[in-house]
Image (cartoon, grey):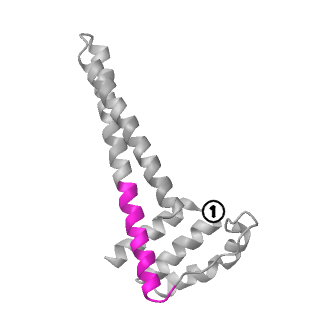
Amino acid sequence: MNRFLAGAIVMSLLLLVYLGFALVYASILLRDDSPIVNAMGVALVVLPILGAWGLVSEWRFGVSADRLRRALETEGDNGYEFPQTPSGRPDRAAAREIFPQFQAAVEAHPESWQAWFHLGLAYDAAGDRPRARKAIRKAISLHR
C-alpha cells in the first residue's frame, strides 16, 4: 500500500468519525422541544449526507483514475515524467513549457482516453488541479 492510499484511508476514516458525531449531535437536537433547535438538528442531518456523498464520489474518482493508470501501464505506457524540483514535486514552469504537446495530442485524437489522461497529468503538474480533474474525468468517461 502506498503512502497516498494510506493517507486517503486515514482521512476518510476521520471524516466518517466526524460525520458520525454530527449525526449523534443532530439526534440530540431533534429530540428538543424548540423548533429552532429542531431546525438546527435537521441541518446537522443534511450535512453528513452531503459529506458522505462527497466522500463516495471522491473515492469513485480515485479508483477510476487508478484503473486508467494501471491500464496505461499494461499497455507499456508509464506516462511522462515531468521535471521535478529538489523537493520532489513537479516543476510547474517546466510543465507549462511542455504542456502544449499534451494539448496537441488531445486536439489530434479527441476520442483517445490516453491523450486525455496524459493531459490531466500535465494540468496537474502545471498546478491547475480543477482542469486536471476535468481532463481525467473525460478520460474516465471515454474509457467506459
Say which residue label 1 marks.
Answer: 127
Q: Which residues are magenta?
A: 57-77
Can you give x and y, in whole percent of width and height, for residue 23 in the image? 31, 30
Which residue appears at 36% of the width and 30% of the height? 21
Q: Position of residue 19 (x, y in %)?
A: 36, 36
Residue 37 versus residue 118 in the image, above or below: above
Q: Is residue 110 visible?
A: no
Q: Residue at x 26, y 13 (%)?
A: 32
Image side of residue 118 versus residue 56, left or right: right
Q: Is residue 93 magenta?
A: no
Q: Position of residue 80 (x, y in %)?
A: 59, 81
Using residue 99 as the reference point, say whether residue 59 is left or right of it.
left
The residue positioned farthest toward the front in the image shown: 1
Report the amino acid beneath label 1. Gly
The secondary structure type at the circle numbered 1 is: loop
Work out which quarter of the rendered image holds the C terminus and state it. bottom left
Q: Relative to 103, is 13 above or below?
A: above
Q: Residue at x 50, y 53 (%)?
A: 7
